[in-house]
Image (cartoon, rainbow, N blue to C red):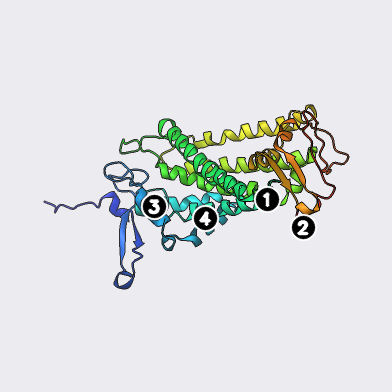
Amino acid sequence: MLPKTHAPDDGARHRLAVPSGGGGDHASSSVSISSASSSSGAGGLSPLGTASPVRPSDYLARLLDPTQMDVQSAMDQMRTLLSLQPQRIYKTSYYRKQTKNHWARDDPAFAAVQVALLLAASLAYSVAFRPANGMLLTTIIGFAIKSVVINFIGVGVLVATIGKTISDRHLATVGRTHVKQTVEWLYAFDIHCNAFFPFFVVVYGVQFFLLPLVLGTSLMSLVISNTLFAVAFSWYFYITHLGYRALPFLSNTEVFLFPIAAVAFLYVFNLVGYPFGLGFNGSRVMAYDISNEHICIGPKKQGVISINAEIFKRAQVTRPSRIFGLSTKFKESEGVNALVSKKAFGEFMT
């Protein structure tokens, strides 16, 4: 009789040596992690068929301790998102799944840096649109709350929940283990954080330096403003699509690109509706949102533009004398007037 031989299991043939990362005597040691064990299936699941999510307590603990956050890594990931290959950022999620058995970040540095950038942008916009009544601090706090709590966290929670629900119910496929995998909610929120950064750069960053142009009522102002918002929203949905496409157990993730069609429709609608007074300027809407009472642009002592918020509702779309004209004409009704100085926009950035 021939001696019995034992064939190596599938996991033994595909082991990935990963440095332990420890210091001292353990610096040279390594751990062997199976990348395709028979009990894990696609995506590296645990034997029970469920992922090992990041514990909220650990996430919050690192958020409260800046020494445990890798800010440099977060900055590198932000640069990747602005490159021609933003999908590379999700490679780290795949490696994290293979080594730690979860897709989501366990380092809150990326979200913390974004919150800091939003606070800085809120300060800049509040100073630019400072209220005529002098309540600058109230404007800063109000716009910061809207930007961080509502636009970033609130919208992020909503979008992550919707994305996870759609993925789990309609896009998830059953793997070799016959276990239907689900998307980690924190990973869905990570996708929102990734997608929000290019949106922030365009809407909060680039637009700030173009305020003298985009706040006018001319067709050129409307085109520049709405182009910025169209690019920002399209970029957001594209990065979102890349995040869900990186999960091997999801199919037909192209559905996350569908909102771009709605963005294109609104963009064309504004151009076509401009001659009929139906188009709206995204930058002017944002300016109205910053201050619900008054919007003040430029140095006070130089003669500012003091615009009552009601004017944005009653503004009459008119053709300016020149294509880049920043003079603003408003329909006067019920005692609402726009006081426009001659040098307000010209001296805005000086």
Compared to 16, does 315 lie above or below? above
Tell me how far mark 1 sits from mark 4, CA to CA. Answer: 18 Å
x and y percentages locating residue 136 in the rendered image: 64, 50
Q: Secondary structure under badge 2? A: loop
The image position of residue 183, as x and y in percent, is 40, 40
Q: Earlier in the sequence, mark 1 or mark 3?
A: 3
Q: Amino acid at mark 1?
A: Val
Instruction: Locate residue 340 relative to residue 282 in the image: left or right.
Output: right
- Of all residues, the one furthest to the top in this rendering is 276
Relative horizontal placement of residue 188, taking residue 319 as reference (left or right): left
Q: Residue furthest bottom?
A: 24
Q: Which secondary structure lies at badge 1?
A: helix
Q: Earlier in the sequence, mark 1 or mark 4?
A: 4
The residue pinned by badge 4 equals: 113
Report if the CB atoms under discs 2 and 4 are less than 8 Å apart: no
Q: Is residue 30 visible?
A: yes
Question: For residue 59, which numbered disc appears in the image?
Answer: 3
Kind of residue at badge 4:
Val
Return the mark for residue 206. Answer: 1
**In the picture provided, is 260 more to the left or to the right than 298?**
left
Please provide percent x and percent y for residue 62: 40, 56
For the residues labelled 1 and 3, the Cα–Cα distance comes to: 32 Å
Name which residue type carries label 2: Thr
Secondary structure, mark 4, is helix
Q: Alpha-carbon distance for marks 2 and 4?
A: 29 Å
> Residue beneath label 2, please?
350
Q: Is residue 150 above or below residue 274?
A: below
